[in-house]
Amino acid sequence: MTAHERNDRALRIPPPPLLPEEQLARGQGHLPGPTHPWIMNVRCQTRSGALAVVRVQVYPNMTDENLGHCIVQAVSSYDALLPTEHNNIVGLFGERDSVFYSLQRILSNPESEQQIFSLHRPLPKEDKDDDSWHLVTLAYIVFGVTLAVASYHYGELIWSFSSGLMVSIFQQLFDIPIRELYRHGPYLIGWENLDLPTICSRITYHGDREFWRRNLEECHAIYGAKEEAFVRVCRPIMYVLLFAVLFLVIRHLVAVYGESKRDRTDRAVVETYHAFQNMIRVITRSMDRQQGGGRRH
């Protein structure tokens, strides 16, 4: 060996050690994973639409290909829908975060035995909770029973109170504004805030202000009769206006509700889209693997 060769050998730096992932890619090792057998929970959807959980035992140093075959056979026993026609599983979705994990990653993660995986992408949970729906239903039942008992024992009192309340509400909403309009409104429909003697002299065309000031009680009676007649004429008009406003509001709410229902995503369509997307992704990966294997040969 010459001196030049000895110098080159002394200066040669050894290559760094391979990472576990690189060793696995070269077929020289396995990713570190659980050192004991554990149970993997895989959720699948049967052909009838029901959801089932398949339990697959995973042993140390198990390869991703063997795990995929075990999942396919276990899922087939439940008559479930497999993601592809070739029954080639390369990964699963985590139900906790909806992330697609490869089988290699699942085998190397010690926390995989605490998770539940799914063949298809889990859909986001609906905002409506079953427990809240039961609570609302129970509240309606309790309210209905309470109202029935109160009506049986205190029906007459409740009726008198409710009728008086309705009369008071209608007076506040309609009668008082109409009376104020008649007294203080413009000349075409009201008396422009004139005093009672002047109003009575114009209504009756008899006597002057001094005369009706001396007969103020009769003036009050005449004005009250005219005011009541004006209220009776205006009340139906106010009812028609109120019903028209309510009709417009209800029609607007129905239109808004219809638009929201029209824009709502169909759950079955979303599931079909996700299944088709997963199928295309897995087929693409399988084709890439086959092309990579052909190039190696």
Image: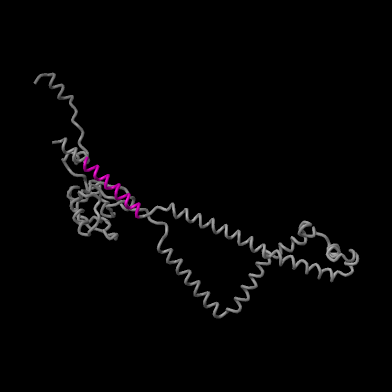
Quarter holding the C terminus is top left
Query: What's the colour scheme?
Result: one colour
Task: Decide if residue 189 is on the left or right side of residue 280.
Answer: right
Q: Residue at x 53, y 74 (%)?
A: 147
Total labels drawn: 0
Q: In this orientation, which residue lies closer to the viewer: 42 or 152?
A: 152
- In the depicted structure, whether residue 106 falls above or below residue 132: above
Task: Decide if residue 193 is on the left or right side of residue 44.
Answer: right
Image location (x, y in percent) of residue 236: 67, 65
Q: Which residues are magenta?
A: 268-287
Q: In this orientation, which residue lies closer to the viewer: 163 or 252?
A: 252
Image location (x, y in percent) of residue 173: 67, 63
Q: Residue at x 21, y 33 (%)?
A: 16
Q: Magenta region, mostly helix, strand or loop?
A: helix
Image location (x, y in percent) of residue 59: 18, 53
Q: Residue at x 52, y 78 (%)?
A: 149
Does residue 271 belong to the magenta stretch?
A: yes
Quarter holding the N terminus is top left
Q: Residue furthest left?
A: 1
Task: Decide if residue 62 is on the left or right side of residue 266.
Answer: left
- In the depicted structure, whether residue 74 falls above or below residue 235: above
Q: Quadrant of residue 184?
A: bottom right
Image location (x, y in percent) of residue 279: 26, 47
Q: Residue at x 14, y 24 (%)?
A: 9
